[in-house]
Amino acid sequence: MAHGYWIFGPFAKLGPLRDTPNANLAGLLGTLGLIVLLTGALSLYAGSNPPQPNVTVTTPNPPDAFKSSEGWNGFASAFLIGGIGGAIVAYFVISNLTLIQGLFG
């Protein structure tokens, strides 16, 4: 979820709509679009028959899930769900920041 949560900030606070009332919504939509594009890239990589990782003595063994297309597709779907969830949480936190600050002091 962290990638969706942290990507939201630059889109909302540094984007071209940063001075409008809908800056947070534009940041959410931009984040969701980027997450969907990155998930598509992961899915394309999964379909390209990824090479087996070379394991040397100094590197840890990668999980067995990354040795198959199904494992990469599972990773891509978890990336999508986590990214969307993180972006929505960030949107609600930023949109309700005054309420949250009022609760805690």
Image (cartoon, grey):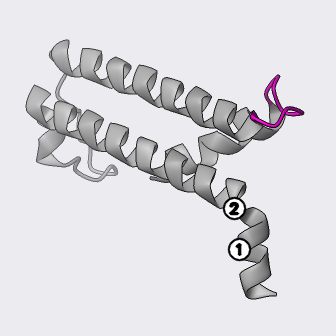
Q: Where does label 1 land, which residue? A: 100
Q: Which residue appears at 43% of the width and 42% of the height?
A: 84
Above or below residue 67? Residue 104 is below
Residue sticking out furthest to the bottom: 105
Residue 20: image location, x then y, percent: 85, 32
Q: Dot 2: what SS? A: loop
Q: From where the camera sits, is residue 39 visible?
A: yes
Magenta-drawn segment: 15-22
Residue 88: image location, x then y, percent: 51, 48
In the rendered view, does 2 fall on the left or right side of 76? right
Q: Amino acid at mark 1?
A: Ile
Dividing the picture into quadrants, the one containing residue 67 is top left
Q: Where does label 2 land, which residue? A: 96
Q: Dot 1: what SS? A: helix
In the rendered view, does 80 fall on the left or right side of 21? left
Q: Is residue 17 magenta?
A: yes
Q: If the image is split into quadrants, where does the C terminus sit? A: bottom right
**Number of the label disc, if any, that sits on residue 62:** none
For marks 1 and 2, give the CA distance. Answer: 6 Å
**Residue sitting nearer the eye, 83 or 20:** 20
Q: Which residue appears at 10% of the width and 32% of the height?
A: 70
Q: Is residue 10 magenta?
A: no
Residue 18: image location, x then y, percent: 84, 33
Disc 1 packing (10 Å; few <14; some 14–19; many ≥20): few
Q: Which residue appears at 19% of the width and 31% of the height?
A: 73
Above or below residue 3? Residue 28 is above
Residue 99: image location, x then y, percent: 73, 71
Above or below residue 81? Residue 39 is above
**Residue sitting nearer the eye, 64 or 47:** 47
Dividing the picture into quadrants, the one containing residue 12 is top right
Q: Is there a contact, CB below 8 Å, between mark 1 and mark 2?
A: yes
Q: Amino acid at mark 2?
A: Asn
